[in-house]
Image: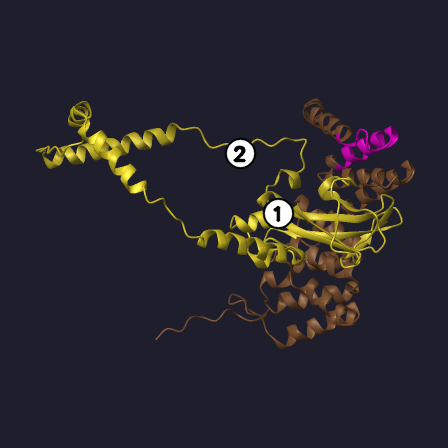
Chain colours: A yellow, B brown
Amino acid sequence: MSAQYHPLVKRLLDGELSLAELPAELRAEGEQALRLIRGVDRAPVTLPATLDARVMATVRRHAASPVRRAWRRLTAPRDVELRLRVRPWTVWAGALAAAAAVVLLVSRAPAPSSPPRDAGLPARVASHDSVYVRFVLYAPGAQRVTVAGTFNQWDQNAAPLAPAGTNGVWTTTLAVPVGQHQYAFIVDGERWVADPRAPAVDDGFGRRNSVVAVIAQGARTL
Amino acid sequence: MTALRSALLAAVAATLPLVLAGQGDVAARLDGRVPPEVVRAVQGIAAATAARGLPVEPLIDKAIEGGAKHVPADRVIAAVRALAARLDEARLALRQGGIETPGADVVEGGAYALSAGLSRRQTSDLVRVSRPPYDPALTLRVAATLAALGVPPQQTLDLMESMISAGRAPGDLLDLPSGVQAGVDQGATPAQAANGLARGVAQAPGQNPNFVPPGQAKPHPHKP
């Protein structure tokens, strides 16, 4: 059942997202999934009437076994009382020796090194921080819409948008690493279109790129 | 003189492997994405840029973007060269603003501000007022975003400066672009929307409890 749900809806079911954090077009699906889960949770559990009798018969059979009783006598935990008589100065000496050992170990331990960083990877890719960003484009009549930018190495096949109904709205939600990114939509594999809802700058090639800045502070975008 | 020459040779010998490794990395990133002549040119531009202590990642991104958009090789090389020059200009603006050795994110923020239309002087001015708790990388990005939304650069700078001098919390700056966008959605021009935000700043003083208006001494705690 759950295999048919959108990955974000699955995260909702796992408790990682709230309903309000879902994109608007997924909320109905999310609500339906939550309703189903609640229904399952509240379904009464009916046990067969003979279950009690079968369980008790098994318990009695095990309890009656002499071998099992002997084994239990050998292995069952028992309370044992130990009395120690120590002088106070021995306690203090022990504590001081333990403290000295800890100091020695800490001073001889190697300094923590910074995590290895592959020089071939840029910092923005090495960072694990990312924020879900929803990309939306109104492109009526389009057969295929994708989004490419610095967050996916301008790969125009990496992030396809899905049509949201039949009204020409295309959308996708991507995990975008913290940092500043430029991007554009590609309509039908050939037309590069800037996001009309986002700030834009000259791309240096005579077109415009949209810009999204993903900020670590509060995990948000500008 | 001999000692100086030896030191220079040692420095070159020490940095050469790094430069060559960097060039190999650039080539690996660009291989198959752009024509060979673009790879060679970007390797050279990136090496020179890295030698000046500037980030090269935006240059590689720009070359890859040109390849993805099927832009002719000479235009890709020109765009990468122009971007390298903008990174240089950004660092100059940052230095004039008081940051002698800016990090890569600040340089990229400065380059974004320049791309969005702020002048070098305006960029320097913004950096100069972006003292703690304000992060210059963040203020530059916010200003650049406002300018890219269509707010005139000088008005952008004035709005940012008024927010900072009013002692608004750094996080409040992040709301400015969405504020402008909301105004535009209601039919205002970006300049009108920014004007509305500036009036709001003037009417509602800052909430930062540590803020002391310029020229005023920090009040002493009252002693009974």
Can residue A115 be seen in the rendering of this structure?
A: yes
Q: Residue furthest front?
A: A50
Q: Return the mark for residue A105.
A: none
- Any part of residue A218 in sight: no
Query: Quarter holding the N terminus of chain A?
Result: top right
In the image, residue B121 sits, relative to residue B219, either above or below, namely above
Q: Residue B179: give x, y in percent of width and height.
A: 69, 67
Q: Which residue is mark 1?
A: A5
- Label 2: state its secondary structure: loop
Q: Chain of mark 2?
A: A
Quadrant where the C terminus of chain A lies?
Answer: bottom right
Q: How many marks?
A: 2
Q: Quadrant location of residue A47?
A: top left
Does the segment drawn in magenta span residue B43? yes
Task: Name the spot of residue A8 as percent of width and height, x first.
Answer: 61, 49
User: At x 71% / y 68%, what residue is drawn?
Assistant: B182
Q: Main secondary structure of the magenta part?
A: helix
Amino acid carrying mark 2 in the image: Ser
Task: Please check the rendered image and state whether residue B94 is part of the magenta-colored stretch, yes or no.
Answer: no
The amino acid sitting under disc 1 is: Tyr
Q: Secondary structure at mark 1?
A: loop
Q: Is residue B45 above or below residue A189?
A: above
**Which image quadrant for residue A103?**
top left
Q: Which residues are magenta?
A: B29-49
Crowding around mark 2 (Cα neighbors within 10 Å: few <14, some 14 to 19, many 20+) is few
Quarter occupied by residue B136: bottom right
In the displayed structure image, the side of residue B180 where residue B81 appears, left or right = right
Residue at the location (59% across, 66% down)? B168
Q: Which residue is mark 2?
A: A114
Which one is earlier in the sequence, the residue at label 2 or at label 1?
1
Q: Residue B151: image x %, image y %?
A: 78, 65
